[in-house]
Image (spheres, rainbow, N blue to C red):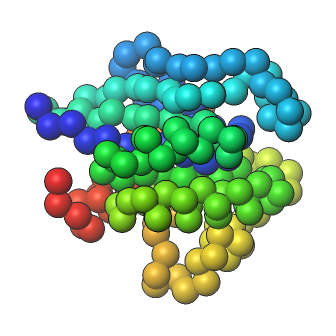
Amino acid sequence: MEIMRLVVTGTVGAGKSTFIRSVSEIAVVDTDRVATGPAAEIKTRTTVAMDFGRLQFAPGMALHLYGTPGQSRFDFMWDILIRRAHAYILLVAAHRPSDFRLARRILAFMNQRAQIPVLIGLTHVDCEGAWSVENVAIALGFLDEKNRPPFVTLNANQKESVVNALIVLIEHFMQNSVM
Protein backbone atom coordinates (compact mmCIF):
# COMPACT_ATOMS: atom_id res chain seq x y z
CA MET A 1 0.00 0.00 0.00
CA GLU A 2 1.36 3.40 -0.98
CA ILE A 3 0.72 6.18 1.48
CA MET A 4 0.72 9.80 0.46
CA ARG A 5 1.15 12.26 3.32
CA LEU A 6 -0.69 15.56 2.85
CA VAL A 7 -0.51 18.46 5.27
CA VAL A 8 -3.51 20.75 5.64
CA THR A 9 -2.35 24.08 7.03
CA GLY A 10 -3.61 27.62 7.33
CA THR A 11 -4.72 30.27 9.77
CA VAL A 12 -7.10 29.82 12.71
CA GLY A 13 -10.65 29.23 11.51
CA ALA A 14 -9.75 28.64 7.86
CA GLY A 15 -11.32 25.15 7.97
CA LYS A 16 -8.40 22.73 8.42
CA SER A 17 -10.05 20.40 10.95
CA THR A 18 -13.37 20.56 9.12
CA PHE A 19 -11.62 19.77 5.82
CA ILE A 20 -10.11 16.60 7.29
CA ARG A 21 -13.33 15.56 9.04
CA SER A 22 -15.26 15.95 5.78
CA VAL A 23 -13.33 13.20 3.98
CA SER A 24 -11.70 10.96 6.59
CA GLU A 25 -12.94 7.37 6.60
CA ILE A 26 -11.71 6.93 10.16
CA ALA A 27 -12.62 8.88 13.25
CA VAL A 28 -10.33 11.90 13.10
CA VAL A 29 -7.65 12.00 15.75
CA ASP A 30 -7.57 15.56 17.01
CA THR A 31 -5.99 17.65 19.73
CA ASP A 32 -8.68 20.29 20.05
CA ARG A 33 -8.71 22.36 23.22
CA VAL A 34 -10.62 25.39 24.42
CA ALA A 35 -9.44 28.37 22.38
CA THR A 36 -7.75 31.23 24.19
CA GLY A 37 -6.46 34.62 23.12
CA PRO A 38 -7.29 35.89 19.63
CA ALA A 39 -8.38 32.40 18.49
CA ALA A 40 -11.27 32.54 20.99
CA GLU A 41 -12.73 35.47 19.05
CA ILE A 42 -13.15 33.20 16.02
CA LYS A 43 -14.09 29.83 17.54
CA THR A 44 -14.52 28.01 20.85
CA ARG A 45 -12.09 25.13 20.26
CA THR A 46 -8.81 25.05 18.36
CA THR A 47 -6.16 22.51 17.33
CA VAL A 48 -3.04 22.62 19.50
CA ALA A 49 -0.94 19.82 17.99
CA MET A 50 -2.50 18.17 14.93
CA ASP A 51 -5.46 16.46 13.35
CA PHE A 52 -5.11 13.14 11.57
CA GLY A 53 -7.46 11.54 9.08
CA ARG A 54 -7.19 8.85 6.44
CA LEU A 55 -8.79 8.40 3.04
CA GLN A 56 -8.45 5.43 0.70
CA PHE A 57 -8.04 7.37 -2.52
CA ALA A 58 -7.49 4.53 -4.98
CA PRO A 59 -6.80 0.79 -4.80
CA GLY A 60 -3.45 0.45 -3.09
CA MET A 61 -3.21 4.17 -2.28
CA ALA A 62 -4.20 5.93 0.91
CA LEU A 63 -3.99 9.58 1.83
CA HIS A 64 -2.89 10.45 5.32
CA LEU A 65 -4.13 13.94 6.12
CA TYR A 66 -2.30 15.89 8.81
CA GLY A 67 -3.85 19.15 9.98
CA THR A 68 -1.64 21.75 11.60
CA PRO A 69 -2.58 24.21 14.33
CA GLY A 70 -3.34 27.67 12.95
CA GLN A 71 -1.64 29.65 15.70
CA SER A 72 1.99 30.56 15.11
CA ARG A 73 2.88 29.69 18.72
CA PHE A 74 2.49 26.06 17.66
CA ASP A 75 4.81 26.41 14.65
CA PHE A 76 7.01 23.61 15.98
CA MET A 77 4.19 21.30 14.84
CA TRP A 78 4.24 22.89 11.39
CA ASP A 79 7.92 21.99 11.23
CA ILE A 80 7.37 18.39 12.34
CA LEU A 81 4.46 17.73 9.99
CA ILE A 82 5.85 19.29 6.80
CA ARG A 83 9.17 17.45 6.89
CA ARG A 84 7.79 14.11 5.64
CA ALA A 85 4.88 15.43 3.60
CA HIS A 86 4.50 14.80 -0.11
CA ALA A 87 2.37 17.92 -0.66
CA TYR A 88 0.34 20.44 1.29
CA ILE A 89 -2.69 22.65 1.04
CA LEU A 90 -2.77 26.12 2.57
CA LEU A 91 -6.32 27.09 3.52
CA VAL A 92 -7.04 30.80 3.57
CA ALA A 93 -10.31 32.33 4.80
CA ALA A 94 -11.06 34.72 1.94
CA HIS A 95 -13.26 36.93 4.14
CA ARG A 96 -10.55 37.73 6.72
CA PRO A 97 -7.87 39.85 5.01
CA SER A 98 -6.37 40.47 8.45
CA ASP A 99 -5.20 36.82 8.32
CA PHE A 100 -3.44 37.11 4.94
CA ARG A 101 -0.13 38.20 6.50
CA LEU A 102 -0.05 35.08 8.71
CA ALA A 103 -1.06 32.91 5.73
CA ARG A 104 1.88 34.35 3.82
CA ARG A 105 4.15 33.61 6.80
CA ILE A 106 2.92 30.01 6.97
CA LEU A 107 3.55 29.62 3.23
CA ALA A 108 7.13 30.92 3.61
CA PHE A 109 7.71 28.71 6.67
CA MET A 110 6.57 25.58 4.82
CA ASN A 111 8.49 26.42 1.65
CA GLN A 112 11.71 26.91 3.64
CA ARG A 113 11.41 23.39 5.02
CA ALA A 114 10.13 21.41 2.06
CA GLN A 115 10.13 21.92 -1.68
CA ILE A 116 6.89 20.08 -2.36
CA PRO A 117 3.75 20.87 -4.35
CA VAL A 118 1.29 23.25 -2.71
CA LEU A 119 -2.32 24.14 -3.40
CA ILE A 120 -3.99 27.27 -2.07
CA GLY A 121 -7.57 26.61 -0.96
CA LEU A 122 -9.84 29.59 -0.40
CA THR A 123 -12.58 29.04 2.13
CA HIS A 124 -15.45 31.29 3.23
CA VAL A 125 -15.71 32.72 -0.28
CA ASP A 126 -19.48 33.04 0.18
CA CYS A 127 -19.10 35.34 3.21
CA GLU A 128 -19.54 39.09 3.13
CA GLY A 129 -16.29 40.87 2.40
CA ALA A 130 -14.61 37.83 0.82
CA TRP A 131 -11.78 38.69 -1.54
CA SER A 132 -11.55 37.27 -5.05
CA VAL A 133 -9.05 34.55 -5.94
CA GLU A 134 -6.97 37.08 -7.86
CA ASN A 135 -6.81 39.55 -4.97
CA VAL A 136 -5.91 36.86 -2.43
CA ALA A 137 -3.19 35.59 -4.79
CA ILE A 138 -1.70 39.08 -4.93
CA ALA A 139 -1.98 39.47 -1.14
CA LEU A 140 -0.06 36.21 -0.72
CA GLY A 141 2.70 37.49 -2.99
CA PHE A 142 1.81 35.66 -6.20
CA LEU A 143 1.97 38.55 -8.64
CA ASP A 144 2.75 36.47 -11.74
CA GLU A 145 -0.07 34.08 -12.60
CA LYS A 146 2.34 31.77 -14.45
CA ASN A 147 4.48 31.23 -11.35
CA ARG A 148 1.80 30.51 -8.77
CA PRO A 149 0.47 27.27 -7.39
CA PRO A 150 -3.07 26.21 -8.21
CA PHE A 151 -5.82 28.07 -6.36
CA VAL A 152 -9.21 26.51 -5.66
CA THR A 153 -12.27 27.69 -3.82
CA LEU A 154 -13.84 25.16 -1.51
CA ASN A 155 -16.32 24.61 1.26
CA ALA A 156 -14.63 22.53 3.97
CA ASN A 157 -18.05 21.37 5.21
CA GLN A 158 -18.88 19.67 1.91
CA LYS A 159 -17.19 16.35 1.19
CA GLU A 160 -17.47 16.76 -2.59
CA SER A 161 -15.79 20.17 -2.44
CA VAL A 162 -12.94 18.80 -0.32
CA VAL A 163 -12.50 15.77 -2.60
CA ASN A 164 -12.32 18.08 -5.64
CA ALA A 165 -9.58 20.12 -3.93
CA LEU A 166 -7.68 16.92 -3.12
CA ILE A 167 -7.92 15.80 -6.74
CA VAL A 168 -6.44 19.10 -7.92
CA LEU A 169 -3.65 18.79 -5.33
CA ILE A 170 -2.84 15.20 -6.30
CA GLU A 171 -2.83 16.08 -10.00
CA HIS A 172 -0.49 18.99 -9.22
CA PHE A 173 1.70 16.63 -7.20
CA MET A 174 1.85 14.09 -10.02
CA GLN A 175 2.86 16.78 -12.52
CA ASN A 176 5.58 18.21 -10.27
CA SER A 177 7.27 15.39 -8.37
CA VAL A 178 8.01 11.71 -8.10
CA MET A 179 7.11 9.70 -4.99
**Quadrant showing the N terminus:** top left
The one of 9 and 114 positioned closer to us in this rendering: 114
Q: Is residue 156 visible?
A: no
Q: Quadrant of residue 65?
A: top left
Where 49 falls versus 78 (above or below)? above
Where 144 falls versus 175 (above or below)? below
The one of 9 and 152 positioned closer to us in this rendering: 9
- Residue at 55%, 86% (x, y): give it: 144
- Residue at 80%, 35% (x, y): give it: 39
- Residue at 46%, 18% (x, y): give it: 28
Number of numbered labels in the structure image: 0
**Quadrant showing the C terminus:** bottom left
Q: Is residue 25 visible?
A: yes
- Relative image position of residue 79 (x, y in whole percent): 48, 47
- Residue at 59%, 77% (x, y): give it: 142
Is residue 107 rendered to the left or right of residue 95?
left
- Relative image position of residue 157 (x, y in whole percent): 59, 31
